[in-house]
Image (cartoon, coloured by chain):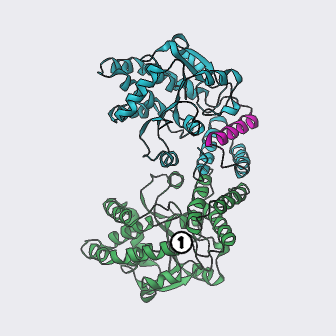
Chain colours: A cyan, B green
Amino acid sequence: MKTYLDCIPCFIRQTIEALRFVTDDPRLQEKIIKEILIETSQLDLRQSPPYMAHRIHEFIRNFTGIKDPYKEVKERFNRAALEMYPKLKEIVKNSPDPIEKAIKISIAGNIIDFGVTADIDEKMVEKTLESCLKQELPADNLQKFKESISKAERILFLGDNAGEIVFDRVLLEEMPLEKIVYAVKGAPIINDATLEDAETVGLTDIVRVISNGTDAPGTILELCSDDFLREFSKADLVIAKGQANYETLSEVKDKEIFFLLKVKCPVLAADLGCETGEIIVKNNRG
Amino acid sequence: MKTYLDCIPCFIRQTIEALRFVTDDPRLQEKIIKEILIETSQLDLRQSPPYMAHRIHEFIRNFTGIKDPYKEVKERFNRAALEMYPKLKEIVKNSPDPIEKAIKISIAGNIIDFGVTADIDEKMVEKTLESCLKQELPADNLQKFKESISKAERILFLGDNAGEIVFDRVLLEEMPLEKIVYAVKGAPIINDATLEDAETVGLTDIVRVISNGTDAPGTILELCSDDFLREFSKADLVIAKGQANYETLSEVKDKEIFFLLKVKCPVLAADLGCETGEIIVKNNRG
């Protein structure tokens, strides 16, 4: 997906929120935001929004020397999600269609996305879970998802955020784990999950977890490591979680991809032809 | 009021909305937005937000040659407000405290502010009117407002937006008109009212209307004409409508000012210590 004009104020908002994680010094905040405005003025709108977010956060890290501004946030939401885990398992266990519930749970976890807003708390996660469980998934999409999983020999599951990966774990546990490789980011970017988070929530105990070798949000293939690209190429099905994975992979057609996400911004909603707040299970081949 | 970091994404959002009023050409939109990003990077945050908005809109006008992008919007909301006028008069007439209702009506009209969002329609205005009429005005503020009007010999009423001026007319008609001068903008800026709008809605028939001699939002005294500054200086009471007038005059202390506004953004809400959506009648002397 290309960058829309309306993404630009959102980059600036994201910069301000990120800055508040790294420094209380208003002069330093002002200095960085002004540099980012100039940086943004040089943006190529044909690139996807995560490409620009990548540049912004790299700039902030280099300027401040703080390598992982969202570290505490990631730990907090891993903890919160692990506390919810037994309840999530119970919901799936008591359902006549466990994988359908597990998909909704995994998508509900996608609310823990500090790229969209830094105004997220545990209560919001609980409320999102409730509302996601009530939403309908189109029956044909769900059927196609089940069939693709059953047919696939190698599934690459692209994770998104810390905390959210616990919700993904619930979904993974309803899938044929032996076929699955789960990918996380190679280094900290916003609150995206890294190998450390996967270990913290026990994901590494149940599935093979790999790094994508980059610190860009989503999956910008040109920036990923050769090891990751080999896995990507070998997979006959990709499950991509979250907005940034959709934004960076929506134009890939030579491989079957299922996008699982909660739509959290009006620009993406317009691109997808849906409403903000909807839960999406979308196959890239229609 | 100074410019906060959170105002910056809002400037960019406002630029995009304004651009959509002037051109459908995505390349021209992109070109201008990138220039505005650079312009914004040079911003002095000690200036008020309307100062920056002034520079942005001047840039857009000069770049595109379109002098009044919001012309249609202004005409539309003058018309819509004039259609509501008989109903507004009825509400005031049937009230045991007519001026209290008229103040709320005037503040409700402040929702017609295309600086805050371009997503405004007639239905929203109706809904805002309903909710404003239900909100409480602190009794001591209201009492002080009535006393100040009664004591004042020369009142300068600083108008805000087209459409909104019809709501102001309802308030003016409950005040001693002979004491009042009503000021509008000297030239088009966003959807702010100019002399043309004051004539359209019949304001010039009931009160002396003057231009402030500038095309900046709010009242940036350094940019106003000498004629206006003489009126400002002679007035012993100023009534200032809307966010931009608060943002540009909140630090003036050598003259009594009542700010009447609807709080439409979280930055201003934080500055005022209130919630977004609240209606404000605030005396600058506390």
Q: In this orientation, which residue lies closer to the viewer: B26 or A31?
A: B26
Q: How far from the left and from the top, in percent, is residue B129?
A: 35, 65
Q: Residue at x 69, y 47 (%)?
A: A33
Q: Depth check: give the residue in front, B81 or B97.
A: B81
**Within the image, what quadrant is residue B25 found in?**
bottom right
| Amino acid at dot 1 | Tyr
Asked if residue B258 lies in the magenta stretch, the reply is no
Q: Position of residue A16 (x, y in %)?
A: 62, 44
By secondary structure, the bulk of the magenta-drawn segment is best described as helix
Relative to the observer, which residue lies in front, A161 or B26? B26
Who's the residue at 57% across and 62% down the image?
B247
Question: Which residue is rendered at x = 35% and y = 21% of the image?
Answer: A98
For disc 1, the chain is B
- For residue B44, say whether it is visible: no
Residue under label 1, please give it. B70
Residue A63: in magenta span? yes
State the residue in front, A197 or A240.
Answer: A240
Residue B122 in sight in this render: yes
Give the residue displayed 60% in from the left and 33% down from the top: A218
Q: Position of residue A285 (x, y in %)?
A: 50, 36
- Span highlighted in magenta in the image: A45-66
How packed mark 1 is, by other alpha carbons closer than 10 Å (few <14, some 14-19, many 20 or more), is many
